[in-house]
């Protein structure tokens, strides 16, 4: 009896692949970069299970290529790239890799906050170009972090992890969330729930940790940026389209806010026109989960989701559980 075939749309850490190879016929796309649509279609056409990357568009047309497809396993926590409704209509389970990105993404968010506040990346560029001529009392002045106010938009697991880090800097924490945290959680995190307008107006740093949805697309636009302090710094490690990137460029150019530190972009990997040339913007290449430990855990979770489905079991991380009810 032939083994089920698993197609992985891009190289992922080896431990997950080893797990799959022991029980399946494994095919890993060989390209170094985003897979082409033609190659993605070719891979999907002959597989029983697909492990997709967040840069892959998994739409209804792709799903229709192979009626035998048993699962689409996202190698990511987010799955905006997958048409979950289309998968559900075709009785195809969709899974993700939750719970492993919290600490490393919170680490990065706070690293970006510190970088933007103390102008580390800007100073690195200047030093490499020979601009450092010696210490001076007014040279490369940034801003304090300790004792400042941090606004967290979206107080889920990552937002709470960022709040825990802020406590080490004696920061006041404001947050927005549809459902308030419990009094115990608020006390532990030293956090106060406010509306978005208040958060933007009172925070020295605004860190975004909300999912992308129709309600949160361009949640931070020109009007919201104008509500922030002139010295305020915006940090985004959530989803690029939560911010109107063109409006952000104008706000940074016109010194409406003090700075921004971004790990995600609206039309990634493309950047809004003018963003690259701004000294008051720190630009990271989507490093939120980019640690060896975290990416390895993600590969193992994705593999286990696939193997559970191929064995006739319920995958542990379903995002559309109704397909197997």
Image (cartoon, rainbow, N blue to C red):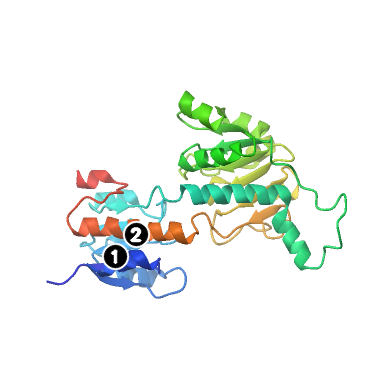
Q: Residue at x 45, y 68 (%)?
A: 34
Q: Which residue is mark 2?
A: 300
Across and down, in percent, residue 71 comes to 26, 57
Residue 27 lies in quadrant: bottom left
Report how many numbered discs are placed on residues in the image.
2
Q: Is residue 266 left or right of residue 69?
A: right
Quadrant of the image for the N terminus?
bottom left
Q: Is residue 200 left or right of residue 183?
A: right
Task: Check disc 1: other Cα within 10 Å, few if <14, some if 14-19, many if 20+.
Answer: some
Task: Check disc 2: other Cα within 10 Å, few if <14, some if 14-19, many if 20+.
Answer: many
Q: Residue furthest front?
A: 168
Q: Residue at x 61, y 39 (%)?
A: 168
Q: Residue furthest bottom?
A: 30
Q: Secondary structure at mark 2?
A: helix
Of residue 235 and residue 271, the one placed in the foreground of this image is 235
Of residue 53 and residue 161, the one placed in the foreground of this image is 161
Across and down, in percent, residue 205 comes to 65, 40
Quadrant of the image for the C terminus?
top left
Q: Is residue 119 left or right of residue 45?
A: right
Q: Spatial distance from mark 2 to mark 1, Cα to Cα?
A: 7 Å
Residue 237 appearing in the image: no
Q: Is residue 95 left or right of residue 169?
A: left
Q: Secondary structure at mark 1?
A: helix
Residue 19 lies in quadrant: bottom left
Q: Are marks 2 and 1 in contact (CB under 8 Å)?
A: yes
Residue 275 lies in quadrant: bottom right
Q: Earlier in the sequence, mark 2 or mark 1?
A: 1
**Label of residue 115 in the image:** none
Across and down, in percent, residue 22 comes to 24, 69
**Label of residue 19 in the image:** 1
Residue 318 appearing in the image: yes
């Amino acid at each position: 009896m032939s083994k089920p075939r698993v197609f992985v749309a891009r190289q992922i850490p080896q431990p997950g692949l080893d797990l799959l190879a022991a029980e399946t016929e494994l095919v890993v796309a060989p390209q170094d970069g985003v897979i082409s649509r033609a190659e993605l279609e070719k891979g999907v056409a002959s597989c029983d299970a697909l492990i997709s990357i967040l840069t892959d568009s998994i739409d209804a047309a792709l799903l229709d290529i192979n009626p035998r497809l048993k699962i689409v396993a996202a190698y990511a926590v987010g799955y905006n790239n997958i048409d979950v409704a289309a998968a559900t209509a075709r009785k195809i389970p969709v899974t993700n890799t939750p719970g492993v990105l919290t600490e490393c993404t919170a680490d990065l968010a706070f690293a970006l906050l510190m970088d933007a506040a103390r102008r580390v990346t800007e100073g690195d560029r200047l030093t490499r170009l020979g601009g450092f001529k010696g210490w001076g009392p007014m040279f490369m002045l940034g801003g304090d972090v300790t004792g400042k106010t941090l606004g967290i938009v979206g107080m889920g697991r990552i937002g709470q992890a960022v709040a825990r880090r802020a406590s080490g800097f004696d920061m006041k924490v404001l947050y927005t969330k549809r459902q308030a945290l419990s009094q115990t959680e608020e006390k532990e995190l030293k956090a106060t729930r406010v509306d978005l307008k208040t958060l933007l107006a009172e925070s020295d740093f605004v860190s975004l940790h909300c999912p992308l949805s129709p309600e949160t697309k361009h949640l931070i636009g020109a009007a919201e940026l104008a509500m922030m302090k002139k010295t305020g710094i915006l940090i985004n490690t959530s989803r690029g389209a939560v911010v109107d990137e063109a409006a952000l460029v104008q706000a940074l150019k016109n010194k409406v806010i003090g700075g921004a530190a971004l790990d995600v972009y609206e039309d990634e990997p493309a950047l809004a026109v003018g963003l690259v040339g701004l000294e008051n913007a720190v630009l990271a290449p989507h490093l939120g989960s980019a640690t060896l430990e975290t990416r390895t855990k993600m590969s193992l979770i994705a593999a286990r989701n696939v193997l559970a489905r191929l064995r006739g079991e319920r995958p542990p991380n379903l995002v559309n559980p109704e397909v197997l009810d």
